[in-house]
Structure formats: structure tokens, C-alpha cells
Image: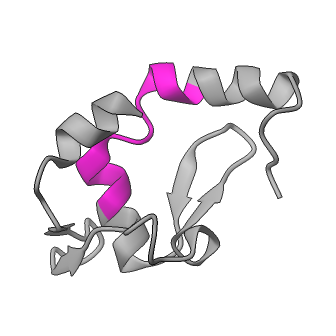
Amino acid sequence: MRFCSLRKSARVTAHDPADGKDVPLHHPRKDEWRRNFAISADYRIEGRSPVGRATIVALGMNRPAIVAIRGELHLLGRLDLR
């Protein structure tokens, strides 16, 4: 998503909201998505790790418009919640 890229910019770390420690952001080419994230029944991304939690907040991954898009994609069969 373009907006996420703009929010990320050159950042490689962010604060984990659970403990405030600085952790690396999720690297989509190096990190396994399911290790850091899950999708809830209401289409929000949940952090499974400090990296996941920090990335969600830093990139604004649960903005209302994005959550709504995930819901529409699921209804169209283009988003798997497993």
C-alpha cells in the first residue's frame, strides 16, 4: 500500500506499544508474515510479536478505510483469514 510506504519512509525500527522498546519493523522480504501478524474476524491486523505490534502502529495498518477494504476483499474471496 502506498500510504504505508509513505508512513514507513526510511524507518527500520519503531516502538512496541506493549513495552515501549525499540524493535525492527517487519521486513516483507525477509520476515514470515504469520510469525508477526494475524487477521481478526473484524479484519483488523493483530500483532503476534513485538515486531508485528510496532509495525502495525508505525504504518497505520488498521486505519478504518484499510479495514473496510479487507472486509470487501474477504467478501469477494480475495482475502483468506486463516
Q: Main secondary structure of the magenta part?
A: helix
- 40 relative to 50, above or below: above
Quarter holding residue 82: bottom right
Q: Residue at x 26, y 65 (%)?
A: 17
Instruction: Out of 10 and 81, give the one closest to the viewer.
Output: 10
Q: Residue at x 66, y 52 (%)?
A: 39
Left or right, 1 with respect to 69, comes to left
- 43 relative to 24, above or below: above
Left or right, 31 with respect to 21, comes to right
Quarter holding residue 1: top left
| Residue span colored magenta | 55-67
Q: Residue at x 20, y 48 (%)?
A: 8
Residue 30 placed where, x, y %?
Answer: 44, 77
Residue 73 placed where, x, y %?
Answer: 74, 26
Left or right, 22 with respect to 5, comes to left
Reply yes or no: does residue 59 show up in magenta: yes
